[in-house]
Image (cartoon, rainbow, N blue to C red):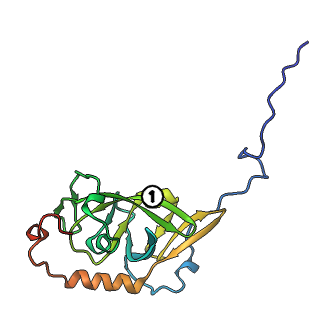
Amino acid sequence: MSVARLPARDISRDPRSSRQAAPPILGFLDEDKVGTIQPHDDALVITLRIEGYDVKRVMVDQGSAVEIIYPDLYKGLNLKLDDLTPYYSPLVSFEGRVVTPKGQIRLLVQTGSEVVEVDFIVVDVYSPYTAIVARPWLHTLEAISSTLHQKVKYPSEGRVCEIRGDQSSARQCLVAAIRYEPETESSVRAEGDL
């Protein structure tokens, strides 16, 4: 009679093991609305650390598939046209206009202790925001966002971390967008101007 030996099972990695720590649960409760002005329909506008700088007026748009930076941030980071890689796909603006990007650039975005590389599309159009982060950034961080609760939550080192939105900044951006009157569009600007 022969006895077959089964390989030892590593129970530390087995999801059925009670010794494995449960991952943090991401979600929102009514308590997460404390400190916000309710009711509201404000965009989720946060401050992020991009390339070592605290950048205000960053909109979180979970409905978008691309991250965007606008001229103010582009200039503020001292980026040049030579820093961009080609990006040939046109984008559609909030107003429904087709926008031709200037290019793409990969920048480091820090959220707490988490640092991720984000591919931003550079566009030369007016926006009250300095940047938009979207689904790729959220998915890389394994984050969820809530405009109602004015927060982004993400797991980090076994706990749930959060970024609070700035409703005052969101409202200022909305007013700026409403008051904005386009002069002549960016096509009148000198080539290479950002």
Viewer-side residue, 79 vs 124:
79
Q: Is residue 74 above or below residue 101?
A: below
Q: Residues within 10 Å of mark 1 (few under 14, many from 20)?
A: some
Q: Is residue 102 left or right of residue 119?
A: left
Element class at badge 1: strand
Residue drawn at 18 percent across, 61 percent down: 99
Residue hosting label 1:
117
Residue 79, visible in the rendered structure: yes
Q: Is residue 49 left or right of residue 94?
A: right
Which of 49/177 is in front? 49
Q: Quadrant of the N terminus?
A: top right
The image shows residue 70 at horizontal and vertical percentages of 28, 70
Q: Amino acid at mark 1?
A: Glu
Q: Position of residue 100 (x, y in %)?
A: 18, 59
Which quadrant, please, contains the C terminus? bottom left
Instruction: Examine the rendering and report whether any part of residue 26 can be seen.
Output: no
Q: Position of residue 161 (x, y in %)?
A: 59, 70
> Which of the pair 88/147 is nearer the observer?
88
Who's the residue at 30% across and 59% down the image?
Answer: 83
